[in-house]
Image: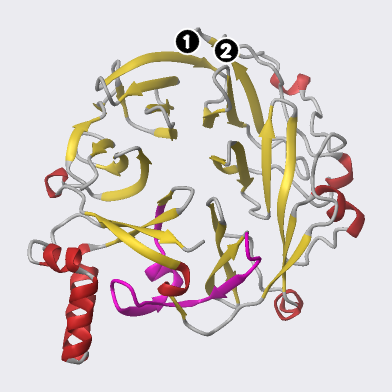
Amino acid sequence: MYNQIKAPKKLLIIFLAILTFSCSSQNSDPGIISIKPDNDVIRFSDMFSGYKIIHVDKDLLLERIYEIFPCMDKYLLYAAGIESRLFILNADGKLIRRVGHTGSGPGEYNYLKGIKVYENGDIELLNRERRKLMRYSWDTGRFLEETDINFDVIPDDMIRLNDETYILFVKFPSLGSGDHSNSIYWYSDKNKEIINSAIRPDPRLSNYLFFGEVMNLYTIDKKVRFYTVFRDTIYSIDKKGVVPEYIFDNGRYHISENILYNDYNEVFEFGDACTKAGCIWDIRYLYETENHFIFHYQYRNDFYNGLYNKQSGETITSNAFYDDILRMSEGKTHELLSIAGRTERSVFLKVPAVTLINDIKDYRERCKDEEWDEYVARNPDIIALLDALTVEDNDLLIEFFLKN
């Protein structure tokens, strides 16, 4: 299937401003969602309906877990191992097989980008060191194809738009002050021909929106979306171009209402107390599920998480959480919400084994006997796991299911 990908030599000459909004089907009357930092502690039970623990195989000897990708009844784990970076696990976290191994030969890799797992079980990734687009089947346990990527600059991320088209993100060196064309999005069909050469902002929005480094290419509700290093706008992308779907407005742009109302579904507007203080920083990370946005931002030298429910329109945000479901402990956002992946209805939180052991041990010491009995009855799986868990275990991955 794969042929060699060829790109024009004079890339910068053929930039095309293909971002058009005249064909957009955006909501003409977007909602304005007000974001106000709340210092009240938010309980996990306010956000999640339940959980599932993935006890990652101890024999893998992982230095660090980066991300987990679920598919059907298996998981692809991206982590820093001794001989591999990718591992296929069963539903209980036990190793099924390693995906290739580190090195510089065929089927080997060192530095990976653009890892994607699709519903049919295909795994695709960019091997940046060898300039290869690689496809792997976890049914056969083999790399099926490798395709040369002959860009002058190595693509930094990619995603399959449909059966015939890929989107490749190519990051170019800075072109000078005020010119944000250094981040280019390429379309490539099944024959690896360039369909559209570049994407530039619509002139009406050039003072407000910029295409910096892409932070994430992901699929939700059969749409491909991304947001950029500026972390303020979520875009959808297809063969026609790019449409902004949502904006996180922290007051810095002063975007006119006619632009907002023509081009956005929802506007997340930070409260006056935030914008007047000038302390809202860019969104630090963002995860979208079928019914929610989970985002992380900085305000007054503290870190906050927000959870927006698309159906109810409700937003909760705080810099402190209390895990009243599993760990029974309170902590700051970055301590309790270390997200390592998501599905359309859940997020995966990464918890060090020693932290889980100590949190539950501490809860047992401070709670009443009847409270402990209730906890044991509510969490039989974690109680059984504690007997075998040691501080030397890999980080646990806990899938928390978001409330509708």
Task: Give the amino acid at mark 1.
Answer: Tyr
| Horizontal side of residue 272 vs 293, given as left or right | right
* Mark 1 touches mark 2? (CB < 8 Å): yes
Over which residues does the magenta segment extend?
A: 311-340
For label 2, the residue is 192
For residue 157, the mark is: none
Q: Residue at x 47, y 69 (%)?
A: 47
Task: Give the amino acid at mark 2.
Answer: Lys
Tell me, yes or no, whether the highlighted magenta stretch contains residue 128. Answer: no
Q: Position of residue 272 (x, y in %)?
A: 76, 78
Q: Position of residue 188 (x, y in %)?
A: 61, 18
Q: Position of residue 171 (x, y in %)?
A: 60, 33
Secondary structure under the numbered disc 2 in the rendered image: loop
Q: Residue furthest left?
A: 387
Measure the C-alpha gap from mark 1 to mark 2: 8 Å
Residue 134 appears in the rendering: yes
Q: Badge 1: few (under 14), some or many (20 or more) residues near its Cα, within 10 Å?
A: some
For label 1, the residue is 2
Secondary structure under the numbered disc 1 in the rendered image: loop
Q: Residue at x 42, y 66 (%)?
A: 48
| Horizontal side of residue 244 vs 312, given as left or right | right
Tell me, yes or no, whether the highlighted magenta stretch contains residue 322. Answer: yes
